[in-house]
Image: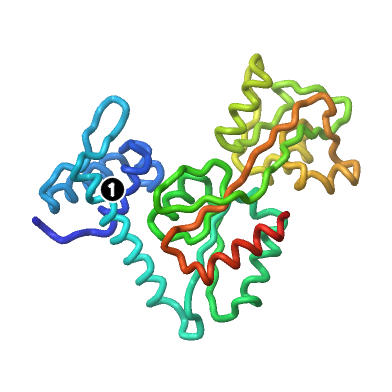
Amino acid sequence: MDGPMNVEHARTFLAVADTGSFVAAAERLHVTQSTVSARVGALEKTLGARLFVRNRSGAVLTNSGGRFLRYAGQLVRTMERARQDIGLPKQFRGRVVIGARMGLWDGAMVDWFASLSRAYPEVSFRAEIGFEAELMQGLVEGRIDVGIMFTPQRRPNLSVVPFLTERLVMVTSDRDLDMRPEAYIHVDWGPEFDNQFSASFPEFPGPAVTVNIGWLGLQCLEKNGGCGYFPERLARSRIAEGRLFVLPDAPVFELPAWVLVREDRSKSLVDPMVDGLRRAVS
């Protein structure tokens, strides 16, 4: 070997392996592509082996890269857990990090999370908001213990269980308003929703406004008027109060959400929490 092993190099390697692209890894890690290339190059020099083959479609693991995958994950997880353990106040015996999309936090998840510190006074908890890519990266690295999202990626070291199924309904600020591009507020609920929307509205030219957070979309709709797809459970109170209306002829989309946990989790600690969360939203 030539030079010390750097945990950021291993973290970058995992991002490239997970996304299959130096460009996508740079976006996920919020660094430049040249930084990603430099880190992977330094890692390859340290290990004395080539880890990726670059081609038009992205980056593919070599045999050496495939063998290093497990060690890189162990290195990042060990350092992350060491950092958390060393910085943990003495009154706590462990820490659990829970990450989810903002739209999934809204509602029963907030009440459930607030109850955890009472149910587990000896455990420190951290809540995070993120999108699928960063939540998956946190799970792969071991930085996140429980991840809740719409479109998870299957990984050998992660278990996936059903959480809830959102019913996305078209709501409008005016019961007589038709769906027009200038009135429609598009929320990025992920690729599964986009596929359903495109199939139902193949000739729709595109929205005037797009947001990636449902809460922001609802605020825009209520302040400026318009229409958009939102989870029925989040819009229910506004509909009951007459502030929003459901377009009766618009299709309803179902979007399943999932809970992801690591295989090497503390099952006696994490599993009862996850069971409680699923009961809270059922």
Q: Position of residue 97 (x, y in %)?
A: 51, 64
Q: Residue furthest bottom?
A: 91
Q: How many marks?
A: 1
Q: Residue furthest top?
A: 203
Q: Nearer the viewer, residue 5 or 279?
A: 279
Give the left or right position of residue 231, taking residue 243 as reference.
left
Q: Amino acid at mark 1?
A: Phe
Give the left or right position of residue 148, taking residue 237 as reference.
left
The quarter in which the C terminus is drawn is bottom right
Residue at point 84%, 48% (across, down): 237
Q: Position of residue 83 (x, y in %)?
A: 37, 71
Residue beneath disc 1: 13
The quarter in which the N terminus is drawn is bottom left
Q: Position of residue 87 (x, y in %)?
A: 41, 76
Residue at point 71%, 28% (across, down): 184
Residue at point 32%, 49% (across, down): 14
Give the left or right position of residue 145, taking residue 31 as reference.
right
Image height of 99 relative to 126, above or below: above
Q: Nearer the viewer, residue 90 or 73?
A: 73
For the residue carrying disc 1, how many other residues have a C-alpha within 10 Å: few (<14), some (14-19), or many (20+)?
A: many
Helix, strand, or loop for circle 1?
Answer: helix
Q: Nearer the viewer, residue 256 or 127?
A: 256
Q: Position of residue 138 (x, y in %)?
A: 43, 55
Image height of 175 relative to 51, above or below: above
Residue at point 60%, 36% (across, down): 188
Image height of 111 relative to 58, above or below: below
Colouring scheme, one of rainbow, by chain, secondary structure, one colour: rainbow
